[in-house]
Amino acid sequence: MKKHQSMNPMIILNKDEQFYKELYNAKKSSSSLKTFLASIDKEDVLKRHLIIPDLFPEFIPYEMTDNDYFQDKNRNVFITKHNRYTPAFIHKHDFFEIIAVFSGSCVQNIGLERKQFKEGDFIFIAPGIFHTMEVFDDSSIIFNILLKKETFYFMFAPMMKGHDLLSEFFSEGMYESQQIKYVIFHTKQEDFIAYQQRMMNLYKEQLYHDDYSDQILIGLLTSQFAYIMREGAETMESSYSSHNEKKHDDFKVMSYIQEHVADVTLEGIADHFGFSTAYCSRLIKSHTGQGFSDWKRIIRIRNAQYMLVNTQMSVREIGNSLGYENPETFIRAFKKQTHTTPAKYRKENISNQ
């Protein structure tokens, strides 16, 4: 794919990238590495949170959580340009990550696979999957897009109809039982300039921190994915085994619970799929670590949390929509799961937006 350097305003290496490039070059011999490490201002390095496995292995962030990137509760989306020449280190996180290759290329180890990506690629990496990133040249620009798990599902669920593999990938991420490690879309050459323009709009909006920026970011990202689906759905590939295209029983049952959470019963699931109730019960337990009733409650409360913050429905209406017979029952269940009431949860989270 032809490079479009004129669209790369970030091509100049920043201060951290210059440091990492010097470290990268120093590693070409043990003597030069030793000299370089000895010359480092350790206090400055720690202040800048630079990753130096040879010097400070204890500070490598192997496991990342929402709290590491979403301390600002106004933010559901976090976008950054990956620092070129950053030493590759294995890590995982409890949120979804999207890698957007704006220009050039990168290499990632995802699980046990080593993958080469090129400009225009749009890669979804599931929560809990160990991976690395390698960008060791001056011209490649890679964006990291991080998205809270609960936000991810509600953003992309409407686009999942008719795409069983995508539905399974996103749903597994919510259920914390990932079998599909990644999903990749490859942008066609004729759509590449539009892809870059949309990515630049996303990155520029990230620089704003007003009352509207997060909602605009969600809209722009949803739009980017919709265009990618429209223009290149047939280019999609994943870690899903080609011989295992049929949905697993566990995914079918978990999806059914999500879709019918207001009135689902164990007997109803068994009747719908022609399974025994004992089989359904074992399947849910092995997949979630929870019994049916507890898992149903967890899903209900997750949905309630989203509706409290993102709709104007009353507490009574939300409880009714999720199958609770009266507000008192809903409030007790919500408090048991979250240690606060629906009204307090709404007030605290809306006040932070």
Image: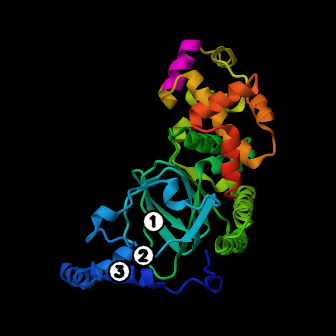
Q: Secondary structure at mark 3?
A: helix
Identified by mark 2, the residue type is Phe
Residue at the image position 75 percent from the left and 48 percent from the top: 310
Give the Cα separation between the discs numbered 3 and 1: 29 Å
Q: Is residue 293 above or below residue 198?
A: above
Q: Which residue is mark 2?
A: 136
Residue 248 seen from this side: no
Ranked by sequence position, the earlier of labels 1 and 2 is 1
Spot occupied by residue 331 in the image (x, y as percentages of width and height)? 68, 31
Q: Nearer the viewer, mark 3 or mark 1?
A: 3
Residue 173 seen from this side: yes
Identified by mark 3, the residue type is Asp
Q: Quadrant of residue 103?
A: bottom right
Q: Which residue is mark 1?
A: 107
Q: Which residue is mark 3?
A: 44
What range of the chain is rendered magenta?
Answer: 276-285
Is 279 one of the magenta-colored residues?
A: yes
